Image (cartoon, rainbow, N blue to C red):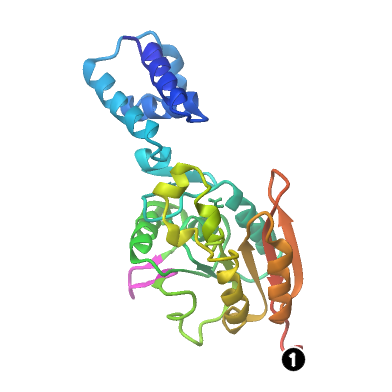
């Protein structure tokens, strides 16, 4: 069979199983199996494949047809132009979340001194690491309740930081500008640790809504990273109450939110004493990020 025909048979099988991006997914899987680049594929489409390639490809198509996420099969996902390792222990990085990162970078450019950053609920580390690489941060701390997620974030730090973030590890005294902390929100964050910026994409899907999500998400992604309890707002309540203690005066927090959570999250942060609250839309035009400022010294009540 030619590569082109093999691709078509895989895409048909995925389409029959209700995979919406069947042709695209089949192409990614074939490129993965053969190691051929997208450009070279066009030239080699009429080449005969070996039995071994066919067998390995068909095996991956079977897995994808059973609704295992493409990224779990490939083991990676690109976010902000960087390739992150993913596993079933972390949320697969979403394009929606790039809205959050881009907004932080925008604000970062307007700051004079290199800020410190905390990423709460880091998962794969995609937010913390892309900001470390693309913005100039003095220090980046990434926290998560899950040790398994932190193992993935650590793998991504080793994969992404060494060539791209200057002096990220000080080999002489063993300190690192990038640090992982296992913590249920702020429980294990030292009380005197304050940041210029805090970012978070916490779990925010109401429990009963998770049941209605695509099988890829519902059955294969960690509920720990999705489940925001009854109304989806559980973690925003705690973040609103606890984040001020870890922000410098005038520091800002940036939160990813669900499309219908903007007004509720705004109220929670307003009630907790934050100011300059903004709701920011993603590219499709849905509310996606809430940004809020912790007041300057002397203005607290
Ligand atoms: N945006 C994700 C989804 O729709 C959820 C992310 C989260 O709960 N933090 O699956």
Residue 14 visible to an observer of this rendering? yes
Write down the region rendered in magenta.
169-180
Q: Decide if residue 33 is on the left or right side of residue 259.
A: left
Mark 1 secondary-structure assignment: loop
x and y, in percent, of residue 94 in the image = 54, 48
Which is more toward the observer, 200 or 47?
Answer: 200
Examine the image and state in which quarter residue 113 appears: bottom right
Which is more toward the observer, 277 or 176?
Answer: 277
Residue 174 is inside the magenta segment: yes
Q: Quadrant of ligand 1?
A: bottom right
The residue under the point 69% across, 66% down is 291
Return the residue found at the far left: 52
Which is more toward the observer, 140 or 23?
Answer: 23
Compared to residue 106, the image places residue 243 above or below, namely: below
For disc 1, the neighbor class at 10 Å (few under 14, some 14 to 19, many from 20) is few
x and y, in percent, of residue 242 in the image = 57, 81
Residue 85 visible to an observer of this rendering? no
Examine the image and state in which quarter residue 51 appears: top left
Q: Quadrant of the N terminus?
A: top left
Q: Decide if residue 9 is on the left or right side of residue 196.
A: left
Q: Quadrant of the C terminus?
A: bottom right
Residue with the mark numbered 1: 301
Residue 289 is inside the magenta segment: no
x and y, in percent, of residue 231 in the image = 60, 65
The residue under the point 43% across, 27% down is 17
């Amino acid at each position: 069979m030619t590569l082109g025909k093999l691709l078509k048979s895989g895409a048909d099988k995925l389409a029959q199983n209700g995979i919406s991006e069947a042709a695209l997914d089949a192409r990614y899987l074939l490129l993965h199996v053969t190691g051929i680049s997208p450009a070279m594929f066009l030239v080699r489409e009429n080449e005969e494949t070996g039995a071994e390639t066919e067998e390995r490809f068909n095996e991956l198509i079977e897995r994808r047809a059973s609704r295992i996420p493409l990224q779990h099969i490939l083991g990676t996902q690109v976010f902000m132009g960087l390739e992150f390792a993913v596993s079933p222990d972390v949320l697969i990085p979403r394009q929606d979340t790039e809205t959050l990162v881009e907004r932080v970078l925008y604000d970062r450019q307007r700051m004079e001194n290199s800020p410190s950053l905390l990423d709460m609920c880091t998962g794969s580390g995609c937010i913390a690491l892309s900001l470390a690489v693309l913005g100039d941060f003095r220090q980046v701390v990434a926290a998560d309740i899950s040790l398994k997620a932190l193992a993935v974030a650590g793998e991504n730090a080793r994969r992404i930081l060494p060539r791209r973030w200057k002096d990220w590890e000080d080999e002489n005294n063993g300190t690192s500008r990038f640090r992982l902390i296992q913590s249920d929100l702020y429980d294990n964050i030292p009380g005197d640790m304050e940041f210029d910026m805090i970012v978070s994409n916490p779990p925010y899907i109401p429990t009963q809504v998770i049941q209605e999500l695509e099988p890829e998400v519902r059955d294969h992604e960690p509920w720990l990273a999705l489940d925001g309890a009854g109304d989806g707002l559980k973690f925003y309540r705690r973040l609103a109450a606890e984040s001020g203690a870890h922000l410098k005066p005038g520091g800002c927090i940036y939160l990813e939110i669900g499309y219908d959570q903007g007004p509720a999250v705004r109220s929670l942060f307003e009630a907790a004493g934050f100011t300059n609250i903004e709701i920011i839309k993603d590219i499709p035009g849905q509310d996606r990020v809430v940004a809020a400022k912790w007041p300057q010294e002397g203005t607290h009540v």
